[in-house]
Image (cartoon, grey):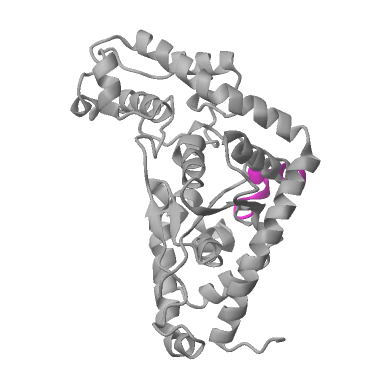
Amino acid sequence: MAFVERVFSGVQPTGNLHLGNYLGAIVNFVKMQETHNCIYCVVDLHALTQPVEVWGGPSELARNTREVTAAFIAAGIDPKKHIVFNQSQVSGHAELAWIFNCVARVGWLNRMTQFKEKAGKDRENASVGLYDYPVLMAADILLYRATHVPVGDDQKQHLELSRDIAQKFNNDFGDSIRGHGFNDGMYFPLPEPFITGPATRVMSLRDGTKKMSKSDASDYSRINLTDDADTIAQKIRKAKTDPEPLPSEEKGLEPRPEADNLVGIYAALSERPKAGVLREFGGGQFSSFKNALVELCVAKLSPIAAEMKRLVADPGHVDAILIEGADRARAIAAETMKATQDIVGFVRKR
């Protein structure tokens, strides 16, 4: 069947949104709203998969949820044209996740590398939620029968799992799906990834081999979206580099992860290919390039930081956006759940 094209994506409210979140996700969110029907979700249920001391407890979760919402709006997402809401307001996410738990296979989850990385050596003490959250992620996407998902490289495996779950559900319940009017036996789409831009994976400013992360002990490893101009300048000027001049061609970046990262950031913020950045700055010293990068970062990020600060100072306004978005999301989710319940064979009120 022909599915209505719809984009779904979400961001965890675990605090300290940074340049990696902006370039790897939010920039694409803004672009996609010009061409697609978009649903953008603050995935607060996912935050609970980590220990309480990581996500900060109830008051911190609420604050972080509002901050992510503020970042969406400040970056240019229009909550009137598209849907912006927090996941916990729509019960269908958890309900569909249970059905998908009974479709997914343990072997599939055992292959998820993110669980191994996040749980570390002490996997026995990791929460069941951390192990199972890729299934909830599949439910997040498929509850709205989304066809496209903007993801970073590290989330491609989870999107593949979403596709596997959708395909198995369609196969397992194919006769029932056809019996309910979906003649091709396809109720859930197989969502496609959007992976775009030269900085889909932004690395640490202190170590070009590690992803930029809010959990890094050093605040100098990242540029937070709430950083002021002086802080941004200081972090970029202190960013790790090497003694060689910038290369003139992309191939010269391959053995130089820190140089590659900074060039990628400049390319993404200026919406140019890396090759174009190197044509301008190749052969020059890092000091000059860093000065240009400071100017660009401040020009792009300072207005977002200012608008985020204004929005966070008005939590009632932010909450109203989330409530209105949840009402709209719930209407779509309810239709999906009614059809899913009928397909599975649940008896329900008509």
Pinpoint residue 56: horizontal percent, then vertical percent: 69, 43
Residue 272 location (% of width, % of height) = 34, 28
Q: How far across and how far down the image is residue 284, in percent?
A: 27, 10
Query: Quarter holding the C terminus?
Result: bottom right
- The residue that appears at 44% across and 90% down in the rendered structure is 175
Query: How many badges with numbers are in the image?
Result: 0
Apparent side of residue 200 relative to residue 54 in the rendered image (left or right): left
Looking at the rendering, which quadrant does residue 96 occupy?
Answer: bottom right
- Residue 295 vertical placement versus 12 (above, below): above
Is residue 172 covered in magenta?
A: no
Q: Quadrant of residue 239?
A: top left
The image quarter containing residue 161 is bottom left
Residue at the spot x=50%, y=28% of the render? 222
Residue that protrudes farthest toward the right in the picture: 316
Relative to 61, is 281 on the left or the right? left
Of 48 and 282, which appears nearest the observer?
282
Query: Does any portion of residue 261 appear in the rendered image?
Result: yes
Q: Position of residue 339 (x, y in %)?
A: 57, 80
For image coordinates 30% across by 30% down, the residue present is 273
Quarter holding the N terminus is bottom left
Q: Nearer the viewer, residue 166 or 237?
A: 166
Is there any visible trace of residue 238 in the rendered image?
no
Vertical placement of residue 135 versus 320, above or below: below
- Segment colored magenta: 48-60
Q: Is residue 116 above or below residue 293?
A: below
